[in-house]
Amino acid sequence: MKNIVILISGRGSNMEAIVRACAAQGWPARIAAVISNKPDASGLAFAAEHGIATATVEHKQFATREAFDAELARVIDGFAPDVVVLAGFMRILTAGFVQHYAGRLVNIHPSLLPAFPGLHTHQRAIDAGCKLAGATVHFVTPELDHGPIILQAAVPVRPGDSEGELAARVLRQEHQIYPRAVRWLVEGTLHVERGIVTQTEGESQLAYAAD
Ligand code: NHR
Ligand code: GAR
């Protein structure tokens, strides 16, 4: 049984999708904990209702990023994690933290990386006149949103889309691809060579969706 620890900052709908897929598909894993940097993150209630341990490490209570990351890592390591999942987690992590979890720390970013790393991705894609948008699951490395790409989903940007409409279309695909990528990590079916990730059982590492 592998231990998955999920970090959130808010709603946690990606966390929910992973919790449900783990149970429904009988992964050889358990969600050991859901941890937030914000005490009011609504995803914490869902986790608690499902019998999952929860914790909050509030970044505002630490003077430096290093101090916050050290406490966060201490709390995470208390759950003996095999896999650490960033799911709408909104704090940039220090290189030391990232290196401590090298190869077992993943993120979902709401753009087709390497386009639009950072924040406000949907509005930036609309403003650039992009015809496709999407989401990327990647290994986390010290450089923000630049780690090896595990899986991507593409969706159309429709004429007149608002940021919210595009975000909702992308989010539906996030809920499809993130559980798939975490399952691969749990099963140990990902191989990384020179920054290129392959799924060793030949499962598809891309998705397209019109809606
Ligand atoms: N840390 C590292 N080192 N590498 C990555 O690839 C990371 C990371 C931490 C988080 C998620 C990322 C995203 O998917 C992620 C990837 C937060 C910010 C940010 O600017 C940017 C990207 C991501 C997460 N955060 C502000 C900060 O000062 C705070 C913003 C806020 O609180 O609203 O940390 O997009
Ligand atoms: C998701 O769209 C995720 O990709 C994005 O925030 C949303 C979180 O939703 N992540 C980031 O922007 C990270 N900077 P959720 O809390 O419902 O999973």
Image (cartoon, rainbow, N blue to C red):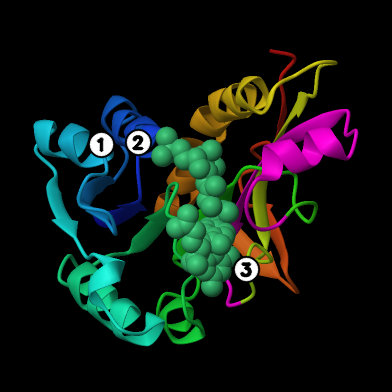
Residue at 78% in and 56% down: 114
Q: Is residue 64 left or right of residue 168?
A: left
Q: Residue 153 location in percent, x, y? A: 69, 34
The magenta stretch is 117-142
Q: Secondary structure at mark 2?
A: loop
Badge 3 is on which residue? Answer: 144
**Depth check: 34 or 24 in front?**
34
Residue 188, can we see it? no
Label at residue 76: none
Residue at 11% in and 31% down: 49
Q: Residues within 10 Å of mark 2 (few under 14, many from 20)?
A: some
Q: Residue 112 location in percent, x, y? A: 75, 44
Q: Residues within 10 Å of mark 3 (few under 14, many from 20)?
A: few
Label at residue 42: 1
Number of numbered discs on residues: 3
The image shows residue 67, relative to residue 38, as above or below, that is below
When asked about the image quadrant of residue 104, the answer is bottom left
The reply to whether discs 2 and 1 touch (Cβ–Cβ < 8 Å) is: yes
The residue under label 1 is which amino acid type? Ser
For marks 1 and 3, give the CA distance: 25 Å
**Depth check: 210 or 21 in front?**
210
Q: Secondary structure at mark 3?
A: loop
**Depth check: 106 or 181 in front?**
106
Q: Residues within 10 Å of mark 1 (few under 14, many from 20)?
A: some
For marks 3 and 2, give the CA distance: 22 Å
Marks 3 and 2, the one that precedes in the sequence: 2
Badge 2 is on which residue? Answer: 11
Q: Secondary structure at mark 1?
A: loop
